[in-house]
Amino acid sequence: MGTRLGKQTLRLDSHPVIQAWASIAGAKEGNGPMGRYFDEVIQDEYFGEKSFEKAESKLIRETLAKILMKGNVSAGDIQYIFAGDLLNQCIAASYGVRESEIPFFGLYGACSTMAESMILGSLMVEGGFAERTVCITSSHFCSAEKQFRFPLEFGNQRPPTSQWTVTGSGGVLVGNSGSGPRIVHVTTGKIVDMGITDANDMGSAMAPAACDTITAHFTETGLAHDYYDMVITGDLGIHGKNICKQLLEENGILIQEILEDCGTMIYDTEVQKTNCGGSGCACSAVILAGYLLDKLSKKELNKILLVCTGALHSPSSIQQGESIPAIAHAVGIEMIS
Amino acid sequence: MGTRLGKQTLRLDSHPVIQAWASIAGAKEGNGPMGRYFDEVIQDEYFGEKSFEKAESKLIRETLAKILMKGNVSAGDIQYIFAGDLLNQCIAASYGVRESEIPFFGLYGACSTMAESMILGSLMVEGGFAERTVCITSSHFCSAEKQFRFPLEFGNQRPPTSQWTVTGSGGVLVGNSGSGPRIVHVTTGKIVDMGITDANDMGSAMAPAACDTITAHFTETGLAHDYYDMVITGDLGIHGKNICKQLLEENGILIQEILEDCGTMIYDTEVQKTNCGGSGCACSAVILAGYLLDKLSKKELNKILLVCTGALHSPSSIQQGESIPAIAHAVGIEMIS
């Protein structure tokens, strides 16, 4: 039933297993330094569909199919699927899992969705409510740009603090048996809003939330600051990562050496002109389901803390002068023999 | 740890308690037949704010405050809050709970959100992961109209199958002790899409999902069809309720006598000109946190099955010719001495 370690953290005593994982990414992501870790790279941003939204749904649908195949299970073996995305009314998720007939919980955690879904999915397993759950998310550069910023045809300039929404989908199968990376701790975030109002600088908005959750995690677990091989935030980008480092240092959390960010890893920012790096729900999802779980399963990494970061604003809330509420959820994943 | 009764249903052996509940509704809802059951009725649709979106956030914020007050607890006593709404990026929920500092799971289940949040909130309690969780949602006629349909100033005609989005917020405090109505069964929905493409006829789109979940509930629990005093769907409206009745009869689920719908109860549809009735996340939320829990706590009702129904489309998906995926989640609530 898990052991509560503080206001935000639970230790999962059964250590739910990440039994399988899969990722599909876009061409730009495929050309980046992480390209070889993805299960599939799509060259056509429409993925053979007639709209970017339908393409994004297909990313989820196909990633789910890969997860089931790699886990050697069928949809009927999954008790719950937790899924969400950035599109209005989360249509990538709902249309993406529509035909699966798996009992479905729709989530909205913006770019924190991968960790949010893994917390809930692993708790279902830990609680004995499910043998297997799937946790999955997506984002798409083109559907996000048209919804959050400008039509692509407009060709707007991008400010230096901007980030590039990752096209892709990543997900995991979490179960109560088998071998593989295990979910040992989960730290659920609370909303942190430091008053940032610039939707082109989400790293600054999200860094305090990441710091808050990481601080809670180390404080509540009592783990040494060098316990993990890597503490990896979701999509703070270059600027946000620097802020997060500084805030953690002020909190006395000395993990500067092991702090990484999926947003700074996914592109060659100089060559690929992505300014501060990657963002979007898929940013942490494809780095997790591509690079990180590969390294864990090969024991090149043994313990990581994945801290997915989300900015919970909308275009309307920004237009109405509101600041950006942010959240970060953390999942401690370990190889346990 | 709950007992699994089939693919979609769990029996919660600890019977998590609905310790407190609160509802705030708009003026039109206050003037309807359920008006006297709401904790507060607001006359100003802006609720003193500068936009409908901010008003909707305030509905959640104030309802949360009422729940905590009525439950005689502070925000620090709540381990998790599950919240969602209809607005793009679910800003009513995120801005509404922003200052609470409660670990937050954002949900998107459209109008099924009340039951979705209660399933997850009660499972956190059942699993021993939380002593107390809050489950809350909102909708607002004005913010929904401008986002999903037309600007209010346009004064468009409303087709006969249309429904009226409820302005309000409702929520519950679910805990592991105390007396009060208890959550005994939860049945998680899967997506059902029968090909309806008319966003002005969501009753038809959602009725098959309601039927699917209700059928699963009775089949998996083995409960007699007259076990409940009331089986109450979320917002099928007059037309959708009739379809649901017929579909249930075809499935051999004979609950026609006890089947009700929050959408048909909340307005005097003839006088208030709401066509097929109410809809929106708040429709089932305020009927639950107003009328139903009042009747249960007075033992005028003893066993109910709340079946919240959601249409998981977006304006974009409809414009792109997609049909409407629907879902229904069910929560069995009983008075147990």
Image (cartoon, coloured by chain):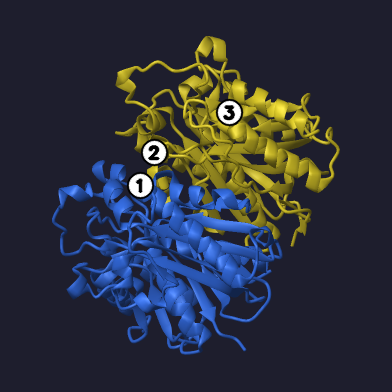
Chain colours: A yellow, B blue
Specify the label residue A207 is tagged with. Answer: none
Q: What residue type is labelled 1?
A: Ser
Q: What residue type is labelled 3?
A: Ser
- Circle 2 residue: A320
- Residue B40: x and y in percent read 42, 69
Q: What residue is at 66 percent from the left and 78 percent from the top?
A: B178
Q: Are marks 2 and 3 in contact (CB under 8 Å)?
A: no
- A90 lies above or below A324: below
Q: How many residues crowd mark 2 within 10 Å: few (<14), some (14–19), many (20+)?
A: few
- Residue B89: x and y in percent read 44, 44
Q: Quadrant of the C terminus of chain A?
A: top right
Q: Which chain carries label 2?
A: A
Left or right of A288 in this view: A148 = left
SS at mark 2 in the image: loop
- Residue A224: x and y in percent read 86, 38
The lab-note entry on whether marks 2 and 1 share a chain reads no
Q: What residue is at 30 percent from the left and 42 percent from the top?
A: B316
Among the 4 quarters of the image, the one containing residue B56? bottom left
SS at mark 3 in the image: helix
- A3 lies above or below A245: below
- Residue A87: x and y in percent read 41, 40
Specify the label residue B51 is tagged with. Answer: 1
Q: What residue is at 50 percent from the left and 72 percent from the top?
A: B331
- Circle 3 residue: A204
Q: Which amino acid does label 2 sit on?
A: Gln
Q: Are marks 2 and 1 in contact (CB under 8 Å)?
A: yes
Q: What residue is at 63 percent from the left and 70 percent from the top?
A: B72
Q: How many residues crowd mark 1 within 10 Å: few (<14), some (14–19), many (20+)?
A: some
- B264 lies above or below A92: below
Q: Which of marks 1 and 3 is in front?
A: 1
